Image (cartoon, rainbow, N blue to C red):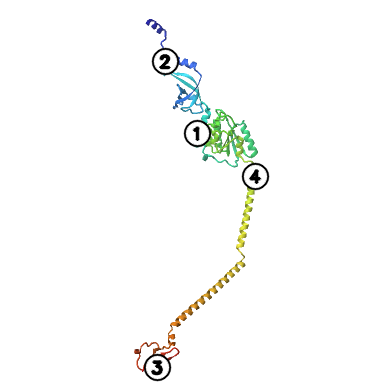
Amino acid sequence: MNHQTDQHTSAIPILSVTRFTQLAQELIEDNLAELLLRGEISNLARPASGHWYFSLKDEHSQIRAVMFRTANRRVAFTPENGQQVLCRARASVYTPRGDLQLIVEGIEPEGIGGLQIALEQLKTKLEQEGLFALEHKKVLPPYPQSVGIVTSATGAAVHDILNILERRASGLRIVLRPTVVQGVEASASIVAAIEEFNTSRCVDILIVGRGGGSLEDLQAFNSEEVARAIFASQIPVISATGHETDYTIADFVADLRAPTPSAAAELVVKNRNEVEQHVDQLRLRLDSAIKHRLERSRSALGILTHRLRSPEQRLQWRKQELANLRQRLDAGIKHSLENCRYQLSVCSRELEALSPLQTLKRGFAVVEKQDGTTLVTSAAELEPEERIKIRFSDAALWARVE
């Protein structure tokens, strides 16, 4: 039994670990060269080298995966842990550790396109930086003298813009800067055109856009480079990408968004008929305002004329007022004199009641000494043979004391 086992074992080749991993690598990579796998991203790492390392898992298993920077540069969105994705990959064996892994060549979110994911992520990023803020929007000049157009020279958009501008403002100076609006070179071409216009400052306003298209067709107008070039422009920018309902990143950053290229041209210049009509309306409003002002002035003048009579009439008013005052003064003086007379009469009666003459009339007499100023109130004041004066009510007599 042991002899047979030894013979069987001697028939199996002895391999080194390195050789075994090389054989496993050849077997797996030759037979699993193109795979599509659905799974959830976990353990995502993005080191400075630019490569992406992560695990792709489902409810039962997981496998390591790597996406080198040469491949992930083409990915339009940023993968995140927990995201369900669809990977185009090939199986490989990492020989230094003997690990089975996936070399991912393409990755796309499951259920929604990668471009849409990238659009939402970039939109959030730029909005947080303030590129969409209203305070950064520049005011469009009401009557520009020149307009710059950044679009394809052969597309329908440029013809629509030119037709509108020539019909509504034939004297407007138009500068077309042809650009690539689709493909890998489109973003750089649009950025270069915007920067050239800002360097030369040869126009008053810019129209940047193209005709409509799919999300892939409009990718240049959803790029970060174009968004930052529009934001940095010192010339006001109108974005017109031909989508009436859908917005691009350029629409959010631009100073004004037009739903179509034709609408952008209409926004640049006002129709001459509209301007003339506006002027006519202003003239009518001005005439009406002047007429109303004159009527108010006439009314105010009438009121002032009524208030400000002629000098003769004003003098007559003053005379009448003076006569009234004189009459009131005379009446006041008369009343005052009568009052004084009455008071004098009362005082006179009171004084008369207190007068010594009234006493003398009742039979009394007043005795005075010879000097006529000293009253004699007692007999002891008199000397024999002294002359005295006796005053009665109707006369005075001289007498001698015995």
User: Earlier along the polypeptide chain: callout 1 or callout 4?
Assistant: 1
Q: Are dots 2 and 3 in contact, CB under 8 Å?
A: no
Tag 3's secondary structure?
strand
Contact? badges 1 and 3 (CB < 8 Å)? no
The answer to whether marks 3 and 4 mark residues whose Cβ atoms lie closer than 8 Å is no
Callout 1 crowding tier (Cα within 10 Å): few <14, some 14–19, many ≥20:
few
Question: Is residue 263 visible in the rendered structure shown here?
Answer: yes
Distance of mark 4 from mark 2, alpha carbons?
88 Å
**Where is 268 relative to 382, above or below?**
above
The residue mark sitting in front, 2 or 3, is: 3
Residue with the mark numbered 4: 277
To which residue does mark 2 refer? 18
Residue underneath mark 3? 399
* Residue position for label 1: 124
Which corner quadrant of the image does residue 374 belong to? bottom left
Q: What element carries label 2?
A: helix
